[in-house]
Amino acid sequence: MVAGTGVQIYAEDRIAEMIQHKFDVLFDEEFWPQFSSWQTLALDGTTGVVTTDLTDILKRFDDIQVIFPENSHTPVARLSGLTTNPFELSGTEALFYDANPGSTQKPFLIWPKTATGNIIVNLRTKPDSFVSGDTVDFDDQALILGATYDYLEDDGTNPNATQKFQQLFEQRVNQLKKNLSHAPVALDRDEVFPTGFVFVPLTS
């Protein structure tokens, strides 16, 4: 950018839009921990929805990572419209989940609708579009490099610099994604070996 107060003022809105765009794209790529949370939600037992208004914490169906029935390690499966007729499901156990079109308060349904009890949901909450003065809770290097790359690409006067910042941006994003995978992953949840046993005699 050319130095000068007037130039910076006129470019400010464009740069803010580029930062917002890069954040929106990166937000959808991963379930970043700073935007994710576990929620315990009660089912209403009749219509397949939860009793809590989710407007402020779950703004889109795609922001659900996993749903578990309470006291279970087995996730509730996503409903397949090609293989499962949800209206043939019955009982009180949560088996499937699907989108609840048209509802911003409760964006997903549990099948069968008569399922009761609590479900445990891991979800991400997308912040509202940023305005001047907001703090963006994301890696500053990724946003700065991404916005710089966009700006240089629009400008088109320095292809070498454009390529340089594109590579720096992609490298930083890959680094952030790798950092998410550093925690150990248990292949078997039953990690505690038994230390004893109970003898049950056979009866005739």
Image: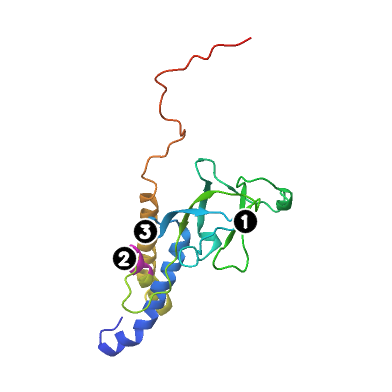
Q: Earlier in the sequence, mark 1 or mark 2?
A: 1
Task: Tell me the kind of residue under disc 3.
Answer: Gln
Give the crowd class for mark 2: few <14, some 14-19, many >=20 residues within 10 Å: few
Residue 157 appears in view: no
**Which region is colored magenta?**
137-146
Spatial separation of the CA atoms under disc 2 and disc 3: 14 Å
Report the residue at 37% width, 78% height from top. 131
Report the residue at 54% width, 67% height from top. 105
CB contact under 8 Å: marks 1 and 2: no
Image coordinates for residue 169, horizontal then vertical, percent: 37, 63
Residues 81 and 180: in front is: 81
Name the front one of labels 2 and 3.
Answer: 3
Callout count: 3
Report the residue at 45% width, 68% height from top. 24
Give the crowd class for mark 1: few <14, some 14-19, many >=20 residues within 10 Å: many
Q: Say which element carries label 3.
A: helix
Give the crowd class for mark 3: few <14, some 14-19, many >=20 residues within 10 Å: few
Name the residue beneath numbered marker 3. 34
Name the residue beneath numbered marker 2. 140
* Residue 195, disc: none
Q: Say which element carries label 2.
A: helix
- Which secondary structure dominates the residues rendered in magenta? helix
Residues 188 and 148: in front is: 188
Q: Earlier in the sequence, mark 2 or mark 3?
A: 3
Name the residue beneath numbered marker 1. 48
Task: Tell me the kind of residue under disc 2.
Answer: Asp
Image coordinates for residue 121, horizontal then vertical, percent: 49, 52
Q: Is residue 143 located in the magenta-colored stretch of the structure? A: yes
Task: Tell me the kind of residue under disc 1.
Answer: Gly
